[in-house]
Image: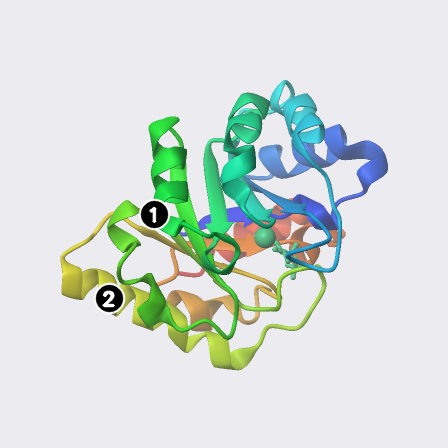
């Protein structure tokens, strides 16, 4: 069944605890936490102390998306803060293999993300080290953007790559500009985890949107 991972970036930062409660009670499967360093992406969001405060507040799977250069430097900090899974960008790591291995060695789920222009074939040598592949459907850095249609096909390419290699336990996640209206086109290609920021947190009734999205399969 499709998992929904609301992105906290679109929440009201003045009341983060309540915002997390709202989506947890509303049926979210995971919580997507976007960490930005102002270097890998042109924006800065939040870091481990915000995540560790929320950890005491929530039982959701913490799906931490690191949009930072050389994320290997911070894996232990995010583990301590309460991450369940850490996703890094292929474009941000000097040694992708070492980074994914370090995440798994800490007992966390390892994710690898591709920016819109990075081809799926670059994943091939690393996919056996991944629990999740994240296809960015917008340029990373900001919430509230429009989904880039040309990225959608990459979801199917990831699915085909897994089939070709006989790998069947990798989550395929997409992130950026996802709405109840365009989600069907992504699940059709093999999406298993949908990240949604604005569509959920900016909705009048987030629970209704999550329920609606979970029905799409
Ligand atoms: C963008 C982030 C996304 C973003 C999604 O760099 O990785 O997770 O918050 O937000 P929406 O759903 O509003 O595009
Ligand atoms: Zn994200």
Which residue does the image show at 63% across and 48% down from the upper left? 7
Indicate left or right for 116 with 106 as reference: right
**For the point 58% across and 64% down, which residue is it?**
178
Q: Quadrant of residue 11?
A: top right
Q: Residue furthest top?
A: 56
Question: Which of the 4 image quadrants contains residue 124?
Answer: bottom left
Viewer-proximal residue, 98 or 33? Answer: 98
Is 30 positioned to the left or the right of 25 in the image? left
Residue in the foreground of this view, choosing between 136 and 205: 136
| In this view, the mark in front (1 or 2) | 1
Q: Residue furthest bottom?
A: 150
Q: x, y (%) of residue 168?
A: 21, 52
Q: Which mark is residue 97?
A: 1
Instruction: Give SS at disc 1.
Output: helix
Q: Is residue 159 visible?
A: yes
Q: Position of residue 127 (x, y in %)?
A: 28, 54
Q: How is the image coloured?
A: rainbow
Q: Residue furthest front?
A: 94
Disc 2 marks which residue?
Answer: 161
Which circle's residue, 1 or 2, is located before the other in the chain?
1
Q: Say which quadrant the C terminus sits in.
A: bottom left
Quadrant position of ligand 1 = bottom right
Is 168 placed above or below 77 here?
Answer: below
Q: Residues within 10 Å of mark 1 (few under 14, many from 20)?
A: some
Q: Position of residue 185 (x, y in %)?
A: 45, 73
**Residue at the outermost right position:** 14
Graded by Cα atoms within 10 Å as few (under 14), some (14 to 19) or many (20 or more), the crowding at tag 2 reads some
Helix, strand or loop at label 2? It is: helix
Residues at discs 1 and 2 in contact (Cβ within 8 Å): no
Residue 69 sits above or below residue 29 on the image = below
Q: At 61% across and 49% down in the image, what residue appears?
A: 68
Is 139 situated above or below 208? below
């Amino acid at each position: 069944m499709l998992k929904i991972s609301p992105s906290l970036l679109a929440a009201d930062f003045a009341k983060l605890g309540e915002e997390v409660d709202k989506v947890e009670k509303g049926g979210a499967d995971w919580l997507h936490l976007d960490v930005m360093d102002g270097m890998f992406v042109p924006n800065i969001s939040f870091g481990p102390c915000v995540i560790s405060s929320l950890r005491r507040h929530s039982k959701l799977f913490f799906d931490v998306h690191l949009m930072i250069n050389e994320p290997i430097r911070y894996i232990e900090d995010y583990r301590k803060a309460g991450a369940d899974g850490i996703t890094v960008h292929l474009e941000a790591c000097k040694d992708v293999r070492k980074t994914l291995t370090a995440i798994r060695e800490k007992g966390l789920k390892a994710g690898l993300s591709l920016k819109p222009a990075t081809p799926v074939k670059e994943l091939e040598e690393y996919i056996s080290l991944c629990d999740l592949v994240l296809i960015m459907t917008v340029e990373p850095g900001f919430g509230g953007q429009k989904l880039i249609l040309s990225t959608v096909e990459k979801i199917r390419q990831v699915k085909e790559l897994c089939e070709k290699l006989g790998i069947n336990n990798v989550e395929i996640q997409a992130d950026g500009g996802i709405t109840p209206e365009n989600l069907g086109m992504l699940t059709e290609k093999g999406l298993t985890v949908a990240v949604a920021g604005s569509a959920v947190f900016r909705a009048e009734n987030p629970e209704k949107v999550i329920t609606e999205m979970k029905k799409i399969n």
